[in-house]
Image: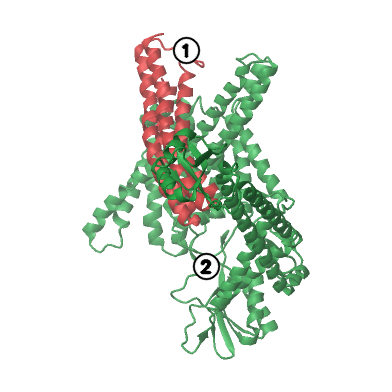
Amino acid sequence: MSTGMVLALIGAALSTILAGIGSAWGVGMAGQAAAGVTAEKPDLFAKVLILQLLPGTQGIYGLLVTFITLSRIGVLGGTAVTDTNTGLMYLFACLPIAICGLISAYHQARTSVASIGVVAKDPDQFGKAMLFPAMVETYAILALLVSILAVTNI
Amino acid sequence: MAIVKMQKLSVCANKKNRKAILEQLQSLGCMEITTEGIDDPQLQKMDTDKQRQQFLRNADAFDEAIRLLDRYAKAPSKGGGLFAEKEQIDRAQFEEVVKNQKQLVTAGQAVQRAEKTIAECRGTIQKQENRIAALEPWMALPVPMDCSGTKQTSYLIGTIEGSITEDQIFAAASAGLEDPAPVSVNLLPGSIPGQNNMLVVCLKRDRDKVENSLRAIGFANPAVRVDGVPAEAKKEIEEDIKSQQEEIARQEACIASYADRREDFRIASDYYRTRAAKYDLLGTIPQSENMFFLEGWVTADRAESVKNLLEKKYDALVEKEEKREDEMEPTVLHNNRFSESVEGVLESYGLPQHGKIDPTFIMSIFYVIFFGMMFSDAGYGIVMAIACLIVLKKHKKLPDSTRKMMQLFFWCGISTTFWGIMYGGFFGDAIDQIAHTFLGVPSDVKVIKPLWFDPLSQPMRLLVWCMGFGLVHLFFGLGIAGAQYIKDRDFVGWFSDVFSWYLFIMGLVLMLLPSELFSSIAGDAFDFSGITKLGPIPKYMALVGMIIIILMQERSKKNPILRVLLGAYDVYGVTSWLSDVLSYSRLLALGLATGVIANVINMMAVMGGNSVAGVIVFILVFVLGHTLNFFINALGAYVHSNRLEFVEFFGKFYEGGGRPFKAFQTANKYVEIKNLNQGDH
């Protein structure tokens, strides 16, 4: 296996690993808050569940980029990477969603926890409360786009 | 397609009709009653708090009784769960319950009393079981535990912890007594290891000496005390437990015997809750010696009929009123059957105020399109549309908000199917994978082709389209802002705040599209070279727009220098347009996410190969995987459709701040009375 291939695979792995860590961390944090609310007000289960899931998307974005990368570097299709530079390009193309996914999921989760607090106090404000975590997600989406566009154009 | 016009009515009527009028209004449920505006020191208010509390307590008691009935006498499930509907009952049945309310309250209390007894019995059983467990090591004791001895001897009953033999205890006990010591140590069999229960017999005169010696090596009284021989005491306790259990069974049967009253309990609970709501209002109504007064909002089309009804039937004086300065009409929306489905989404942001434009119609169209683009799978769309349709057909009496939500997701499902066909996604690439793996189609033949194009192979092309859609959406938002200016006859405002931005942004876009920069980003998917024929027009558009913004946007400022400087700063607002348009890239990203994850699931599903086991693996992975993907991506599409509407679209014009309409109505939780709302709807 060429060095380039190794680098590309590291990139592919990182995007799932880091974004996945972020989401697991985030969904876990928000889940604790959601469980607390459900203990007191079981009717709010569906609403707080939605808020809990919001930081979970980064992990999916990471998986997405991994999959697209693997399908281009000869693991799930495409052609194998032979030179080191191309491998490096794949590695760096994966980094936006890997790093931004990790950090944005954490911060989205903190916002989710706050929003769960809002819903616990006033369930009618769910529509507004849902928006705050969604604002954070924008930057994960931008990172995802950059990663996809970069990987598909190498 | 708009905000419904409201009419304020003021009612003044004889006190003797007070109850009848309130009940009539409550059952109509079409009026929001306010009494805050009427403040005359001559008028008095009734204190109804006590009755209201009593009614609420009754309603709670019935709720509790219903809950107990559900626990001890399970009702045949009617299904529904999330989509539970209120039961329809006859007027006569309702009257019957009202007639028998005293008796029902007694029945409800009986159910609660039975539950209290059951709880007490359970407590007793628990306590007795603990005693039995503590007695267990003493079973071999042949004498009553409180027995102190015979005429000549003393019994010492107790425990020493730790490992010690009978001889050691004997040695300790006989210390200081004559030899052979008149002491007998009997260790009881069946003790817990490390805990030596014993019966020590000695002469009465030696008792203090022996006890002191034993205490010195850790002799202690038993932790448990019963009257009589332990084995017999245990039997007695067991008897008691049995009788408690019988009592529980009796009380459970007693509760279950009320199972046929469940329906009545439900009605009674609703009856008391509704009465509590009435008394709540009653407590705020100003009254004089013979008259009472109230004000309220109704929709304008109902005003005349409500007025007539109250005047004819109850001799009330009803007048149509103008709204006061400090008052705000409540907002009721009325839209066509398609658009009304997003009213709930709009409501969660905030209703529009009167005099403002209701954005529901335009919002609904874009909401459904954007949801479809982000969910973008024909298979998921069909599942979603059919599921919603089944719920809507099966449950005709859903609460309005749930029904609208279901309708919204039905339309979103249709839109999702449409975009799935455009992008060529049906449970991802399920059909291709099945064909290649199980049907022997060569793997380089594509079975399903997208009607438009495959987003994964041309992401840049779709990105440009998404931003195009976004720009159209934003322009509609700005258009509504413009319509509002025109409605308010503020043409200067329209010219300087809306028209200027149209010119400026369109000019900029037209300058960008044919440029080198754009084609180098978008690739050769688009050819906008035709725009160059416009020559310098786009440049002038942008320039004129910018100048209007600089000169006019801050027209409220008196100081001309400040006005121009702040105007120039407003031009900087173009960056918010840029970020808004970029935000629509989520349409691409989430659309890709659905498709690619679905493909990953399919790929894992066919790993079993073409065999019986392979097919089983395929079905399992397929169903599980796609269910998961469905929910996660439906959630994403829902959240981000909301976001695009709330942040980008509403950011251009919407203020919200409307007050929701809270009609004075029945507070029914379980039932709905048929044929009550005559002349209603």
Q: Colour of chain A?
A: red
Q: Nearer the viewer, residue A38 or B455?
A: A38
Q: Nearer the viewer, residue B195 or B408?
A: B195
**Residue B329: image location, x then y, percent:** 51, 69
Q: Can residue B637 be seen in the rendering of this structure? A: yes
**Residue B249 in which image quadrant:** bottom right
Q: Nearer the viewer, residue B107 or B468?
A: B107
Kindly identify the amino acid type of the residue bearing the numbered disc 1: Thr
Rendered view: B420 above or below A43: above
Rendered view: A47 above or below B533: below
Tell me, for residue A79, which label it has, or none: 1
Chain letter of the residue carrying label 2: B
Q: Which residue sits furthest front?
A: B179
**Residue B200: image location, x then y, percent:** 51, 43
Determine the secondary structure under disc 1.
loop
Kindly identify the amino acid type of the residue bearing the numbered disc 2: Pro
Quadrant of the snapshot with the N terminus of chain B: bottom right
Drawn side of residue B109 relative to residue B343, left or right = right
Chain letter of the residue carrying label 1: A
Q: Which residue is identified by label 2?
A: B330
**Residue A140: image location, x then y, percent:** 41, 35
Chain painted in green in the figure: B
- How many marks overall? 2
Q: Can residue B296 be seen in the rendering of this structure? A: no
**Residue B136 in which image quadrant:** top right
Q: CA distance from mark 2 to mark 1?
A: 64 Å
User: At 55% from the left edge and 67% from the top edge, which residue is drawn?
Assistant: B662
Rendered view: B617 above or below B351: above
Drawn side of residue B649 relative to residue B17, left or right = left
Determine the secondary structure under disc 2.
strand
**Residue A149 in which image quadrant:** top left
The crowding category of the residue bearing disc 2, from other C-alpha atoms within 10 Å (few below 14, some 14 to 19, many at least 20), is many
